[in-house]
Amino acid sequence: LRFASEAMEPIAEERSQRHSRLLQSAFRWLVCKRIRRIHHQLLSYIAQAYNKKDINRKTMKFLHLNSILAVMLIGSTEAFAPANNKKTAVLQKQKTTSSLNLESLEQKTPDYDATAQLLDSYGERARRYRRNVFGSADWIKSRRSTRFFDTILSTPQSALIRQISTEVFFIGAIALFVLLYNDFLVEGFTDFAGVKHEAFTHALPALKLPMVPFTLSSGALGLLLTFRTNVSYSRWNEARTAWGKVINDSRSIARMGCIWSKSYKGIDDASLQRLGEAICSFSRSLMNRTLPPQEDEYNFTKYTYERLTDQKYAEILRNAKHRPTAALAELTSALVDFKLNPLHQVEVEKVVTGLCDALGASERIFTSPVPTFYTRHTARFLAFWLLALPLGLYEPLGGSWNHIAMLPVVAVISGFLLGIEELATQMEEPFSILPMEKMCEGSIRTAVMEQVERSQQGIQAPYYGEGKMLNVANPYAGEAVDAAVVRELPPTMAQPMMEAVPVPEPVVVAANGAALNGAPAALGAGGMADTRDPEPFSDEDARKSISSAPTFEEYMKLRNDS
């Protein structure tokens, strides 16, 4: 039997764990002395009954077979323990039980079809109408004198009240059951004529509680709800702050990129258009990242076909697993193609990094909810508290007719407390109630593409001149050099600006403030002036006079001589 049991182990491993333990333990039972003794006793009872002609041969065989099965079932309680190892059996049982419990705690993510059904509910459809962007007219309307009356009258139309209506009706039904049970079965009731009727029976206990437990626990419940609401609002505020950074950084990149790049030679309108579309595609990709695909995937695909000129980039964006990162890569690539001044390149890349920071903040909020054990405990605390509330309010509201005032009081209190919890739930995931589409189109795309159009038309495009410019690579140089052109524009724009902004000849100034070449003293030759004094033009001390400041070479020579 031992060898047979070992031979069955490979086969039993392919079956369920419980089934394999039952098969292996069946052989152990047959060799167990206790089980064998019970089996022999059963067989002897059957044989005695057969000899006395109480049963026939077929019945004896049937009982004989059933006795074997009964013995196996009697020992089934030991099926989960290996032979001769009680410690291993206890550990294996604890391991099996704990693994099942841990798996039950895991929150399962619904599939695509189940998510689509949930999105079709009233609560999810109502979230799309909470994406408000206020203007001056909206603020004026919110300050109207009749706002309280209008809000009260519109309570039946509140989406939040409709969202919690099922829970409120359920708690109201519990309150009605408590009312009817106590009035008709325990304490009696009063009819419409004011006649007091006895209860149907006095054997049942009354369903009521004192208000002391509710008074003591209300503080803890208030703390849980307050913390839940504050955390959810802080998540909404942080998400809105992240999108505000996206708006500001997008405008800054468009401003710096368009104006700086347009002052370079060889930057055409197509390059500016590419920069503007890359900026707008990042915010649109971030919006797609934080919305369910059932709602936004079709609109995003339509956006890439209609709003992006470069369809190769549009295809890359559609097929990317992380679309905001692909948009950032396109944005950096467009800026690199401008071949900006290194100082400008560093500054604009800092702003692009700010967009990446806003992306990380948005993903952190979107992928990390408030700890589920906290929200569940708060919901359970609130549910049990409200379900037991009719028991506590039955006696204090006994002054009303048949305690009927308990029903509206329970409904109102349940609506307010459940509404607070529902507010926290609605704000916990803030992106589906933020007006992201309006921010992408109105706040970002309008400003960015308008800046692109102005730069394409030559409006607000600065000119830095051509020809002789001071050698900015050496801040201490006083002479003018040729071919030190930092930026160039097309000749059609360069010619009038060259005449309007001539580059002066350098002036070498002696230590006493006189020009060595006979020319009058000029500003900016040496740059060693004490600029803390706003008017140091005619001071006798050369160190305090801008007009008499020595050059760097003269300053070093005087320093060495001294």
Image: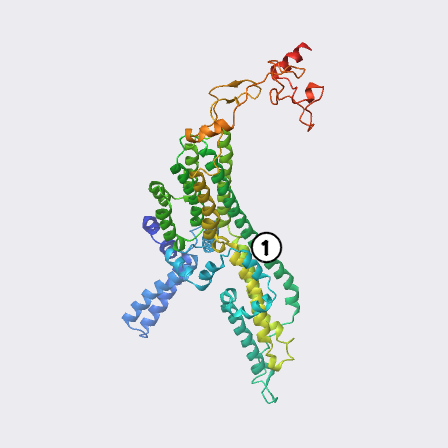
What residue is pinned by disc 1? Answer: 230
User: Is 386 situated above or below 299?
Assistant: below
Quadrant of the snapshot with the C terminus: top right
User: Is 33 situated above or below 494?
Assistant: below
Assess disc 1: are there few (<14), some (14-19) or many (≥20) residues with their C-alpha within 10 Å of its C-alpha: some
Residue 20 image position (x, y, % from top left): 36, 54
Residue 464 image position (x, y, % from top left): 49, 29
Type of the residue with mark 1: Asn
Residue 440 image position (x, y, % from top left): 46, 49
Q: Nearer the viewer, residue 501 or 430?
A: 501
User: Is 148 situated above or below 504?
Assistant: below
Q: Nearer the viewer, residue 219 or 56?
A: 219
Tell me where residue 494 sits by quadrant: top left
Q: Nearer the viewer, residue 79 or 196?
A: 196
Q: Is residue 85 visible?
A: no
Q: Is residue 392 visible?
A: yes
Residue 334 image position (x, y, % from top left): 41, 36
Q: How is the image coloured?
A: rainbow
Residue at the extreme left: 58
Tell me where residue 514 sits by quadrant: top right
